[in-house]
Amino acid sequence: MIVVARLAILVGIAGLIPFIAATIGLFVMPANSIAILGWFYLYSAGILAFMGGVYWTIALQLENRSYPQSPLVSMLLSQLFFVAAGLGLLLQTPQKILLYTAAYLALYIVDARWMRHYWPSWYLRLRLVLTLVVLCCQATVGVWFYLSHSA
């Protein structure tokens, strides 16, 4: 495995720490849940926008090459995830839960289905693991929210 792959794996795993810490924080510090939820969704938005931004750079490299995806589609995908990330910050928590869970799932589907030709195989395996952890955190936070607000 090349050095770039090792670095990406390390940074990717480190990027999970805030998701996991916030999820655990809701259970061990429920008195701080408003701040933790705000932080969790701010981080969710930042990472979603960052990951969507990768498609923009792919589009810039496609102009004079023949790939299965057009530069326009790549740029529009980039903007779709960026706008979803920003819009999510304006929503109430129940809508945030749905939006960010769906957006992270969609992001992986786009990578695995339509962008797989651009990625090395190790990257898609890494993305699957990272996405599963993030989706588990999103779902756990959603369940925590509904259980804590249904009583």
Image: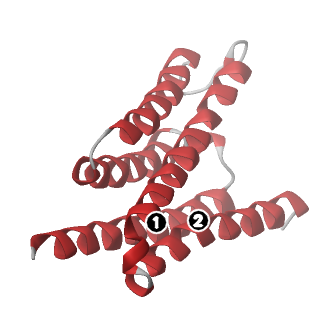
* Quadrant placement of the N terminus: bottom right
Give the x, y percent position of residue 108.
46, 51
Give the x, y percent position of residue 70.
54, 19
Q: Along the horizontal axis of the image, is 139 left or right of 49?
A: left
At horizontal 54% and vertical 70% (from top left) the residue drawn is: 129
* Quadrant placement of the C terminus: bottom left
Question: Is residue 117 placed above or below 35 in the rendered structure?
Answer: above
Q: Along the horizontal axis of the image, is 67 left or right of 26?
A: right
Give the x, y percent position of residue 20.
52, 75
Q: Residues within 10 Å of mark 2 (few under 14, many from 20)?
A: few
Give the x, y percent position of residue 149.
17, 69
At horizontal 41% and vertical 41% (from top left) the residue drawn is: 89
Q: Residues within 10 Å of mark 1 (few under 14, many from 20)?
A: some
The residue under label 1 is 36
Identify the mark nearer the N-term, 2 or 1: 1
Mark 1, secondary structure of its residue: helix
Residue placed furthest toward the left? 151
At horizontal 44% and vertical 82% (from top left) the residue drawn is: 29
Q: Along the horizontal axis of the image, is 27 left or right of 50?
A: left
Question: Is residue 72 placed above or below 46 in the rendered structure?
Answer: above
Q: Quadrant of residue 121?
A: bottom right
Cα gap from disc 2 to disc 1, whole angstroms = 30 Å
Instruction: Give whichever of 85, 37 is nearer the camera.
Output: 37
At horizontal 34% and vertical 55% (from top left) the residue drawn is: 101
The residue under label 2 is 125
The amino acid type found where label 2 is placed reads Arg
Instruction: Give whichever of 82, 147 is nearer the camera.
Output: 147
The amino acid type found where label 1 is placed reads Ile
Residue placed furthest toward the right? 3
Answer whether labels 2 and 1 touch (C-beta < 8 Å): no
Mark 2, secondary structure of its residue: helix
